[in-house]
Amino acid sequence: MLELGQELAEAKNIPPQLMSFTRSDVPDLQSFANSSYDLVSFMDGAHHMPNLEKVKSVLMEAERIAKPSGMIILLDPVRQKTAEVTESYMSIPNQDYFERGLHSFIRDFHDSLYASWTTDELFKAIPDKTQRQWVQLIPFGFPAFQIIIGLPEGQQTLFPHAGLAKSRLNSLIPKGNESSWQMLKFTFQW
């Protein structure tokens, strides 16, 4: 994945000072300086950690290397309440994965859903001693994923200002994705 990321960055002419790739153990990022990043993200990895203390140590390292003005974002699937709900949810993307020839991904996706943390469990991984306000976002209706955000130090709300005008925001949505955007917007409004 690191080689592929490097190839894609080079193909898109992304300068090395904007994107670099390093192999490291996520709970121990000692090779990264304190307060050195504007954004630290941990995507689809929390459910691979053996326990919540390890997830907490990842968030503590993320807080250490994020600038005080930076943000921390963790995104991970949600473990559903029953196996029936999980299996039903699995059937939605499985056909697409199958048609694309991603047969091994189907098994990985299945295992990830069962290994995921509940929203209550993952919330407990937020560091106790922190300078940040932390926010957990869970879509309304069917919570397929969860996002934990460590806000910049001193910021108390996720949206400190009104944001983009609706016309400007709508211009950022790629053609053909308007209905997906509306659904995502609806889930977060609830």
Image: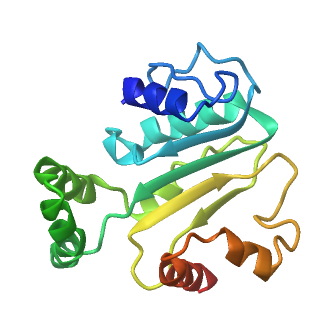
Q: What's the residue at 13%, 54% (across, down)? A: 101
Q: What's the residue at 57%, 39% (across, down)? A: 59
| Position of residue 129 in the picture relative to residue 3 (left or right) | right
Examine the rendered structure and indicate whether residue 118 appears above or below residue 3: below
Residue 158 location, x and y as percent?
75, 64
Examine the rendered structure and indicate whether residue 86 appears above or below residue 52: below
Q: What's the residue at 76%, 47% (across, down)? A: 132
Residue 134 location, x and y as percent?
68, 55
Q: In which quarter of the image is the N terminus?
A: top left
Residue 41 location, x and y as percent?
57, 42
Residue 40 location, x and y as percent?
63, 38
Q: What's the residue at 86%, 65% (across, down)? A: 160
Display coloring: rainbow
| Position of residue 41 in the picture relative to residue 85 (left or right) | right
Examine the rendered structure and indicate whether residue 170 appears above or below residue 28: below
Q: How many labels does the image show?
A: 0
Of residues 183 and 10, the one drawn nearer to the viewer in this rendering: 10
Of residues 77 and 167, the one drawn nearer to the viewer in this rendering: 167
| Position of residue 163 in the picture relative to residue 6 (left or right) | right
| Residue 25 appears in the rendering | yes
Q: In which quarter of the image is the C terminus?
A: bottom right
| Residue 26 appears in the rendering | no
Query: Residue 38, located in which quarter of the rendered image?
Result: top right
